[in-house]
Image (cartoon, rainbow, N blue to C red):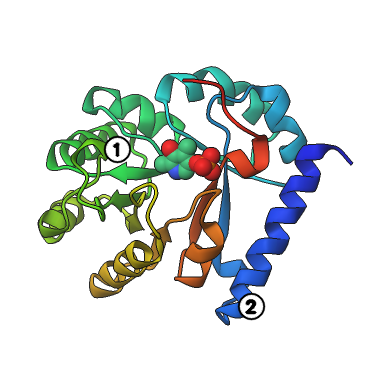
Amino acid sequence: MDNAATLLDEIHGQIAAAAKVAQRKVDEITLIAVSKTHPAEAIIPLLERGQRIFGENRVQEAQSKWPALREQYPDAEVHLIGQLQSNKADDAVALFDCIHSLDRPSLVKALSKAMDKANRRVPCFVQVDVGEEDQKGGCAISDLPELLKLADDAAIPLIGLMCVPPLGIEPAPFFALLDKLATDHGLPGRSMGMSGDFKTAVMMGSTHIRVGTALFGERGNQ
Ligand SMILES: *Cc1c(COP(=O)(O)O)cnc(C)c1O
């Protein structure tokens, strides 16, 4: 068995262990394999091992890799986890099965228009800036109710909230905050947890963990 498949099995084991501690069912937790920067040759072993959901952070990179991979693996899903420019909304709606980075009114407008045009509704997470870090993207907590209402009015299918907590601090309080915000707004999905903190995230209620480095190894500079 090659390395990627071994790592995938290990991560599933760690998810199961964390879920057990939290008395959660493993099938409530979706593993998104974050394949950004990695070529098709690195992705295929995971597809062969049964992994079907992948995360990319750039529209152009995803466009160059996934159409060919999907011919071979038609049931593979690709989720956009990175920031999205409004002028790429059409491309994003055409390509992705889920968008985790809806974070501002202008993007609600652009995505809604793109979804109407394509006659395809792509489920979205609203990204929340839980650490109040301006540079990272994500909607301010105080703007969340308004943004959710706008998205709802625009018939964007909302499945949950997403966050990337600040680096270098204990993430659990931020996961707890996102979990509470999702509960308050009646949303089932919580996209939270990366290679360094997915076990904590699973214990705090994550439904979608986004794991790159722990599956594929370190990324080069991008
Ligand atoms: C790159 C990225 C990840 C994966 O991070 P790792 O630490 O490599 O697991 C998860 N979420 C987002 C938004 C990312 O950009």
Residue assigned mark 1: 115
Determine the secondary structure under disc 2: helix
For image coordinates 53% across by 57% down, the residue present is: 198
Residue sitting nearer the eye, 174 or 161 = 174
Q: Residues within 10 Å of mark 1 (few under 14, many from 20)?
A: many
For image coordinates 74% across by 55% down, the residue present is: 10
Above or below, comparing residue 198 to residue 85 in the picture: below
Residue assigned mark 2: 20
Q: Position of residue 221 (x, y in %)?
A: 50, 20
Residue 81 located left or right of residue 75: left
Q: CA distance from mark 1 to mark 2?
A: 39 Å
Q: Position of residue 119 (x, y in %)?
A: 33, 38
Q: Could you tell me the amino acid type at mark 1?
A: Met
Q: Residue 40: in sight, yes or no?
A: yes
Quarter placement of the N terminus: top right
Q: Is the residue marked 1 within 8 Å of ligand 1, measured from its CB? A: no
Q: Could you tell me the amino acid type at mark 2?
A: Lys
Residue sitting nearer the eye, 26 or 164 = 164
Residue 197: mark: none
Q: Position of residue 104 (x, y in %)?
A: 17, 42
Determine the secondary structure under disc 1: helix
Q: Residue 121: in sight, yes or no?
A: no
